Image: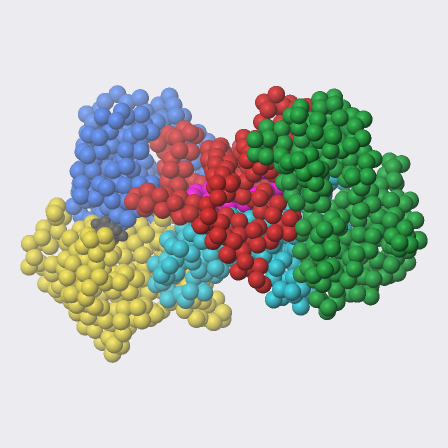
Chain colours: A red, B blue, C green, D cyan, E yellow
């Protein structure tokens, strides 16, 4: 079991040392995953809300599909995006493969169904309560969506944080579309996978500890800012 | 005063409303030609709230039709406001609740500020303008929903038990509102259990039971002695089955 | 899902032996002949060695001599037994911008890649293959440095993933032949340099020591080693073909003679 | 782009053929992930509800931690469980390493924070509404938890399905603790990773399509059963 | 009939309740020694609901103490039932709502079946026993919460505007319930805005405004002419500030 104390020591040491390589990797991880979550949320929040409030033929199917897409395996998402961005693929000319942009796209695809499904659930409950009133006011679909998202913002946060968790912890997709190229597309999780395959479990675990610490910091920040902003008027 | 009113007449013809095969409103037909206050009376579960929502275009009739002047119920809604039996308040402050409603009806920011202050003051809620609306007391919440509807300056006001949780003076205030509303030639339809209140305010009465319209009469005649025996027992406070 | 009844052993192995299909071909035969079920965990060389050191495998199969010797010397393994070899090849785009095709000496090929600054994708994962590649660079005088990053890319991943990248960016790459032959996403890539003795890739078997880990199934493990290194086992290895190509060349009988 | 048509053809072909190996892998995937989700839900639902309804010192910290643990990287979870179950680890004697049981444990750890965090959020809202009434009845903590979970069951479903998505799609942890041993611990995702590393992208994608189809079936079943059970009395 | 009552006297001494620095109840002290009906009167936002919740042990006083006989408010709750101003209904059928409450109070399955049927019948909700409770009409919901409290057979019943949404006959039914409850020597405390109702039923009155208790008097004396001038204006239906 000395691997665990070893790992804690490695983590402490890495943190104390603040090696530029580590900082680079951490910053890239954050940049990629936060961008992916923001992008996914911008699309998934309105879409999830729309599906929640608008009855249309086939909605049940869409809901099930949205839930099912939470099971998209990262490796498959990685492969599909790899093929699309590949030189011989339809978007090859963009030259995005093996860049952080490709990683953002991949994580965005993975995170989108999670935020959309959880948003749908949350907005659905709120909509049950607000529906008649909003219709009484003659609110249009977009006005309904913004009202529901705004009033549900504190609850929607957990779904967004779940999406962030999926993104920052994910390795299968980013390693395929990013290539884990040193100084270019290497992030926390791909480094952890690499150290594991090297058999350097202490380093892998140490990096894992740092990743969780970063997640704690991000969550604390989001909950503190989001919480204090919403407590006033709930 | 009888202003020309493009919302009237309200014509409800052969309207039924069913949920899962259960008839909640059954074959209701009536026409309202005049402005002023129409009161909906009837025992609990008679279908008063459902009928109000049908008239407001919130529920689609299973059969039959509803027209306000030349418009169908959903279109007419734009010039109406409804106060629900159970207050629906957004998770925002009292003032923001009114602001939101005004915004949705297209009022400019300048207009809104004035109207918000005025309507909160009217409802005696000036002190709690910035409180989360859902933390207000039962009566304050109900006052707020009425103030919010009033702020929209609608041509038709639909009120579902608006004074149920109000103290006597707030009740009087709402009754005054109803009177001055009616005086400008607008239309109010109100469901209430307060028979004394109906007696004080109503121009005409619709009496319902079990989803059916049993009597439609001018208030004076109805209060003097309804032709329907159930209605007679009802206003005497007896059990109606 | 029940795994077959009867004794079973765990083999920690590098990925090339698994990915090449060799085990899929050998193990059912071994199973019918001995009744022993072999469970192969295929991971990176470093990870495989770590697993064996922790007693989570009975037999280790890797291809990095220095690590193997260290493993045995530290008492984790009983002894190294030579099993087979295949070889490394340098693959690259058919257009061959560095002009290495036909070069005999792999070091010379790398020098041309470096001087033309043609893209080279390195595994960068401390695996046996990666260490061999670094050895070749060292023979040229120096390892690629940070300012070589424009053409020298470290994928930090397994052989397959590295080949996927190389085929995408039209890069050069060192690969073991077994993975290469089985690799399905070759696109423009082809073998450009092969056959030099510097590119030999010997695999060996090590039985994990009962001294370190009393629970190790020494008897069955030894039986597996003996079977693979027997004449019969070695013939089977030599007979394994993919697309008509022999992937592994038996070493055990010759080594035993020495 | 023939990879995509290729992949669809592969998927169709695999489905038509119904190869026993494929069936074995699919069934193991389902068995492992469903067990992990059920186990995680049994623990996370009451815990999430407890944290939602019981104010205690440090609750804010627990909530943030629960949210942050959604970011646990699978590889790290895999490593930790590997070290614990390793022959020389504290639970080595159990002999669970490289068995489906180890994979269930790993996925359970990954899924637990997701279900717990989403349960907390959902129950918190419901509790706001029920709190005074339940206290008026003198309900004990456990009675409150069961009431809230039962009345929130339809809403909690989405969180559980998010957990299932994470489990069935996950590869980093199961490949470490399961070892991807053929006929023993090989599941859909580890097979996809293996085929990818072999460069057989068509096969990998084909398997990915099948995995998503399976997720659709599971989600449909859960939503249909759960939905019809709850619609009656909501 | 005056039974010996281990819940009484209710002694509220120097109780204040503050939220975010705002005083909702301020320095309220009173004692209730006798069974029967105590009515809480006061304008909207006076603090009636808050005081009921404090007495029921649902809100912790910021200062001061509340005792029911020998017990504190939280312990006493076990033998009490409260009907909230805004109905809280579980997402279950009407019958299951009552069943759930009885289960939590430890009733056996056999007991429960009988009591559920009886209480639904009493409330006139026999027909809708298996309907989702939250789909019932406003009055049906309120009846159900009263039936649910009644089913618990409590020694003390706390009612917050229990007849606000009830039709006249249901209101009469609830008033009868209150009378028969009081007749068995149990205690009821009720907040209401219906002054006629208070006149009909109350044994004593607590009059509140702005979180303060302004008058505590026997009903007859209070209704005859309250000593507090605000209270006098309140029961006359005037604006109270
Ligand atoms: N949690 C809270 N936060 C802030 N203010 C509150 C809170 N709860 C109640 N109040 C305020 O305290 C005052 C008293 O509320 P309470 O509900 O006790 O009044 P009430 O006498 O029952 O009124 P009503 O007749 O309208 O039901 C109100 O002004 C209300 O806005
Ligand atoms: N969505 C629904 N599903 C099933 N039944 C419903 C639904 N909505 C209303 N009902 C039933 O229809 C009847 C009429 O309801 P409605 O709310 O219109 O009555 P109401 O006259 O307003 O009664 P109250 O005086 O109690 O407010 C009630 O018995 C109610 O239970
Ligand atoms: Mg109603
Ligand atoms: Mg109140």
Instruction: Please check the rendered image and state whether residue D96 is part of the magenta-colored stretch, yes or no.
Output: no
Residue A184 image offset from top left, x and y in percent:
55, 34
Residue E72 image offset from top left, x and y in percent:
27, 71
Left or right position of D99 against D231: right
The secondary structure that most of the magenta stretch takes on is helix
Instruction: Please check the rendered image and state whether residue A164 is part of the magenta-colored stretch, yes or no.
Output: yes
Write down the quadrant of residue A172 in the picture: top right
Total count of labels: 0
Against D121, residue A97 (above or below) is above
Residue at the spot x=19%, y=34% of the render? Answer: B117
Q: Nearer the viewer, residue C13 or B203?
A: C13
Residue at the spot x=54%, y=56% of the render? Answer: A7
Residue at the spot x=32%, y=52% of the render? Answer: E86
Against D144, residue E70 (above or below) is below
Residue B145 image offset from top left, x and y in percent:
28, 40
Observer able to see residue E106? yes
Q: Residue furthest bottom?
A: E4
Residue at the spot x=18%, y=54% of the render? Answer: E23
Q: Nearer the viewer, residue C58 or B12?
A: C58
Residue E220 image offset from top left, x and y in percent:
12, 63
Observer able to see residue D201? no
Q: Nearer the viewer, residue A201 or E224?
A: A201
Question: Which range of residues does the magenta coloring cover?
Answer: A156-174
Write down the quadrant of residue B67 in the picture: top left
Against B76, residue B215 (above or below) is below
Q: Residue furthest front?
A: C141
Left or right position of A194 against A116: right
Quadrant in the picture for the N terminus of chain B: top left
């Amino acid at each position: 079991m000395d691997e665990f104390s070893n790992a804690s020591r490695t983590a402490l040491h890495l943190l104390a040392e603040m090696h530029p390589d580590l900082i680079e990797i951490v910053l890239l991880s954050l940049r990629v995953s936060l961008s992916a979550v923001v992008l996914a949320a911008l699309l998934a929040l309105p879409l999830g809300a729309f599906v929640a409030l608008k009855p249309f033929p086939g909605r049940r199917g869409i809901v099930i599909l949205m839930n099912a897409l939470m099971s998209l395996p990262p490796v498959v998402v990685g492969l599909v995006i790899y093929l699309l961005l590949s030189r011989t693929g339809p978007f090859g000319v963009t030259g995005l493969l093996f860049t952080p942009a490709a990683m953002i796209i991949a994580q965005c695809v993975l995170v989108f169904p999670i935020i959309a499904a959880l948003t749908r659930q949350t907005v659905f409950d709120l909509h049950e309560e607000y529906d008649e009133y909003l219709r009484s006011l003659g609110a249009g679909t977009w006005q309904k969506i913004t009202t529901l998202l705004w009033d549900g913002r504190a609850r929607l946060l957990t779904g967004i944080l779940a999406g962030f968790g999926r993104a920052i912890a994910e390795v299968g997709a980013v390693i395929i579309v990013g290539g884990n190229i040193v100084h270019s597309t290497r992030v926390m999780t791909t480094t952890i996978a690499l150290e594991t395959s090297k058999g350097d479990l202490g380093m892998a675990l140490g990096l894992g500890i740092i990743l969780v610490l970063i997640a704690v910091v991000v969550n604390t920040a989001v909950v503190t800012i989001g919480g204090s902003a919403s407590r006033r008027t709930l | 005063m009888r202003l020309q009113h493009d919302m009237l007449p309200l014509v409800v013809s052969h309207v039924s409303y069913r949920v899962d095969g259960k008839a909640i409103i059954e074959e209701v037909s009536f026409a309202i030609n005049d402005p002023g206050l129409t009161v909906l009376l009837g025992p609990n579960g008679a279908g008063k709230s459902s009928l109000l929502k049908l008239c407001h275009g919130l529920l689609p009739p299973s059969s039959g039709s509803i027209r306000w002047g030349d418009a169908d119920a959903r279109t007419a809604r734009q010039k109406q406001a409804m106060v629900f039996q159970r207050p629906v308040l957004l998770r925002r402050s009292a003032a923001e609740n009114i602001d939101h409603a005004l915004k949705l009806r297209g009022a400019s920011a300048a207009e809104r500020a004035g109207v918000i202050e005025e309507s909160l003051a009217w409802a005696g809620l000036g002190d709690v303008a910035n409180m989360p609306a859902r933390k207000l007391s039962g009566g304050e919440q109900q006052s707020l929903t009425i103030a919010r509807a009033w702020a929209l300056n609608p041509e038709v006001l639909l009120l579902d038990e608006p004074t149920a949780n109000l103290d006597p003076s707030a009740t009087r205030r709402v009754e005054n509102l109803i009177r001055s509303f009616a005086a400008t030639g607008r239309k109010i339809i109100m469901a209430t259990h307060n028979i004394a209140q109906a007696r004080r305010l109503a121009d005409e009465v619709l009496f319902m039971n079990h989803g059916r319209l049993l009597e439609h009469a001018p208030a004076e005649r109805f209060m003097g002695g309804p032709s329907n025996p159930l209605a007679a027992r009802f206003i005497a406070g007896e059990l109606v089955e | 899902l029940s795994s077959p009844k009867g004794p079973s052993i765990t083999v920690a192995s590098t990925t090339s032996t698994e990915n090449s299909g060799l085990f899929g071909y050998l193990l059912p035969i071994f199973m019918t002949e001995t009744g022993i079920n072999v469970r192969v965990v295929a991971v990176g060389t470093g990870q495989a060695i770590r697993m064996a050191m922790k007693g989570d495998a009975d037999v280790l199969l890797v291809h990095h001599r220095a690590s193997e010797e260290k493993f045995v010397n530290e008492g984790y393994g009983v002894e190294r037994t030579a099993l087979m070899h295949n070889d490394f090849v340098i693959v690259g785009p058919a257009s061959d911008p560095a002009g290495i095709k036909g070069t005999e000496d792999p070091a010379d090929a790398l020098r041309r890649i470096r001087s033309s600054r043609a893209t080279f994708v390195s595994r960068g994962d401390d695996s046996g293959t990666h260490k061999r590649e670094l050895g070749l660079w060292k023979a040229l005088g120096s390892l690629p440095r940070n300012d070589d990053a424009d053409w020298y890319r470290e994928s930090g991943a397994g052989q397959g993933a590295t080949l996927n990248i190389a085929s995408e960016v039209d890069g050069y790459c060192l690969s073991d032949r077994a993975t290469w032959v089985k690799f399905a996403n070759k696109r423009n890539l082809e073998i450009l340099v092969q056959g030099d003795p510097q590119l030999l890739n010997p695999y060996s078997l090590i039985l994990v020591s009962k001294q370190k880990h009393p629970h190790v199934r020494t008897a069955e493990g030894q039986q597996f080693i003996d079977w693979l290194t027997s004449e019969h086992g070695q013939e089977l290895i030599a007979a394994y073909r993919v697309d008509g190509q022999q992937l592994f060349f038996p070493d055990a009988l010759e080594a035993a003679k020495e």
